[in-house]
Amino acid sequence: MTGLRAAVVRSLLVGLLIAFPPIGAPPATPTPPGNVHLALGDSLTAGVGASDPGARGFAALVTGYLSAQTGRPTALVNLAVPGETTASFLSGGQLARAEAAIADARAAGRRLDPITLSLGANDLIAAPATANDRERALAGVAANLRRILAALVSAAGPGDRAPRLLVLTPYDPTATDPSLPNTDAWWIARLNDAIAAETAGAGGTLVPLDPVVRGREAELTHRPTDIHPTNAGHAAIAAAVWAASRFDRNPPSVRFDRPAPGTLTRRTPTVAALVGDPAGIAEVTWSVDGALQGPLPFVPALGAHATVWDTRPLAPGRHLLEVRATDIGGNVATASLMVEVLGPATPLPSN
């Protein structure tokens, strides 16, 4: 394999991410996260591509969300090894170290949840580019991953407080059509299918990364020199992991700070909303009479998400303002406010 295709495939150290949710359907009342996050796998979990892997890699970011959600520190135990394959994970000691970490946490009375794992992409990279060799690589991933997941689930123990199992499939860095047979994108899609099947067999939840990255490769990866995630890419992956984990099922808080309800005292008032969430806010938008106006950016000087609203094009009368906030877990909350806009010939009331 030569040229751009070889460079792209060799740089596919991005792997998969796996964390372990309770086996079976999620409980009606979700089990809270533990106080230890065990991160395993290859370069993705190791944080390669981030400016500071220990702080801005996705595993570190997820750990921060866990601490914010629970209000207590969560320890990150990151055993990931860049370049790890499913075979080397089994034979090179990472699985044994993971089992020891699980046993140590239990002995110390600490609850380990989640476990995250990124594996599989390097198996495909190492295989020669022939169809037969890649088919053998995919079969090896499936067989090895089945053993790995079974060993981790066994070490973690049964019950409704078992660690969550979340499996993140690798994204396609080539940004090409995966329906075209024997292209790199097609083989990555086949790899994802194999991972999905083993994840389902282990009772896990699949978190596809391709929809997260597709169309945003220039922003979320270091292409064309390297397809590992940028800081923004690791943040997007962490958000996807957090949303899939369902640790956070509570909506963010949102309320209007400005304007006051009733008749507006300015024709270009400030629209400001106070929005909060323990893990963080992903997006805040605002609308007028159901028509989306766009993002409502955070303004540090106001300590709120705010913008200036030009009401002059509106017809006089009552209008509905709404702010919609989405947290990193994908939970949504809204706040609405009815105001009255006066006509251009009507004097404004005094404050």
Image (spheres, rainbow, N blue to C red):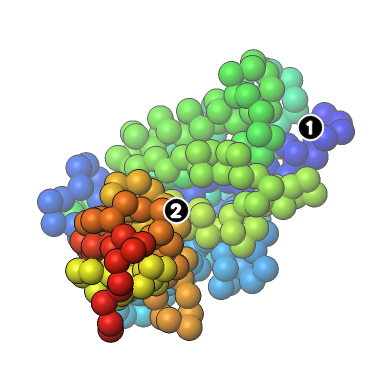
Position of the C terminus by quadrant = bottom left
Q: Secondary structure at mark 1?
A: helix
The residue mark sitting in front, 1 or 2, is: 2
Residue at 65% from the left image edge and 58% from the top image edge: 230
Give the mark, 1 or 2, whose residue is nearer the N terminus.
1
Question: Residue 279 at what x, y percent from top left?
Answer: 36, 68
Q: In the picture shown, does residue 96 fall above or below 226? A: below
Residue 128: x and y, percent?
Answer: 75, 28
Residue 198, numbered circle: none
Whether residue 72 is visible: yes
- Residue type, mark 1 in image: Arg
Q: CA distance from mark 1 to mark 2?
A: 39 Å
Residue 217 to residue 236: above or below:
above
- Mark 2 is on which residue type? Gly
What quarter of the picture does the N terminus occupy? Answer: top right
In the drawing, does residue 347 fall left or right of residue 138?
left
Picture residue at 47% right of the left edge, 35% below the top: 195
> Residues at badges 1 and 2 in contact (C-beta under 8 Å)?
no
Q: Nearer the viewer, residue 73 or 348?
A: 348
Q: Callout 2 environment at 10 Å: few (<14), some (14 to 19), or many (20+)?
A: few
Give the x, y percent position of residue 322: 28, 57
Residue under label 1, please give it: 5
- The quarter holding residue 148 reads top left
Residue at 67% in and 18% down: 182
In which image quadrant can residue 306 be found? bottom left
Image quarter of residue 217: top right
Residue 168 left/right relative to 158: right
Q: Which residue is mark 2?
A: 294
